[in-house]
Amino acid sequence: MLIGKVVGSVVASQKDEKLENLKLLVVQVHDHNNEPQPSYVVAADSVQAGTGDLVLFATGSSARQTTLTENRPCDAVVMAVVDSWDLGGENVYEKWA
């Protein structure tokens, strides 16, 4: 799993039928210190995440392991919204702070 921040969404009116009814999010990758990196991924949303949410996402074959994305042509999926994050005993992120 990787961590990132939802920074936008993608609307595609013409797509493969297996992608119908999937919300597509633009996620900016973050490093272990919650610093944004210069890379982005478009991920299918399986947890109703929204813009500004810090999320866990998976890529590759792991992206097709959720109930929503099973047997669909997805290379990335958001599978959790992060509430808090500690690293070495230090708080890195707190959603409600």
Image: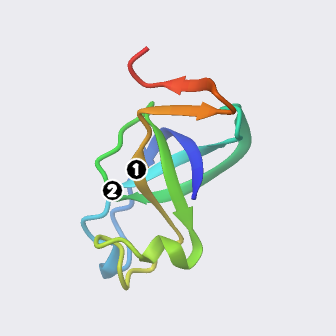
Type of amino acid under label 1: Ala
Label 2, residues with CA under 10 Å away: few <14, some 14-19, many ≥20: some
Label 2 secondary element: loop
Q: Nearer the viewer, residue 14 or 37?
A: 37
Q: Residue at x 57, y 43 (%)?
A: 4
**SS under mark 1:** strand
* Residue 36, horizontal then vertical, whole percent: 69, 34
Q: CA distance from mark 2 to mark 1?
A: 14 Å
How many marks can you see?
Answer: 2
Residue identified by numbered label 2: 23
- Res 74 seen here: no
Labels 2 and 1 touching (C-beta < 8 A): no
Give the residue displayed 64% in from the left and 28% down from the top: 89
Residue reaching furthest to the right: 38
Q: Which mark is residue 80?
A: 1
Does the rendering let one see residue 43?
Answer: yes
Q: How is the image coloured?
A: rainbow
Q: Nearer the viewer, residue 45 or 83?
A: 83
Farthest residue, direction bottom: 71
Quarter residue 12 falls in:
bottom left
73 sits left or right of 4 in the view: left
Which of disc 1 and disc 2 is earlier in sequence?
Answer: 2
Q: Quadrant of the C terminus?
A: top left
Tell me residue 59's x, y (percent).
57, 67
Question: Percent from the top left, x then y, of residue 30?
Answer: 66, 40
Q: Quadrant of the N terminus?
A: bottom right
Vertically, is 53 above or below 56? above
Q: Residue at x 37, y 85 (%)?
A: 71
Name the foreground residue: 97 vs 51. 97
Residue 86 image offset from top left, x and y in percent: 58, 32
**Residue at 29 percent of width and 70 percent of height:** 68
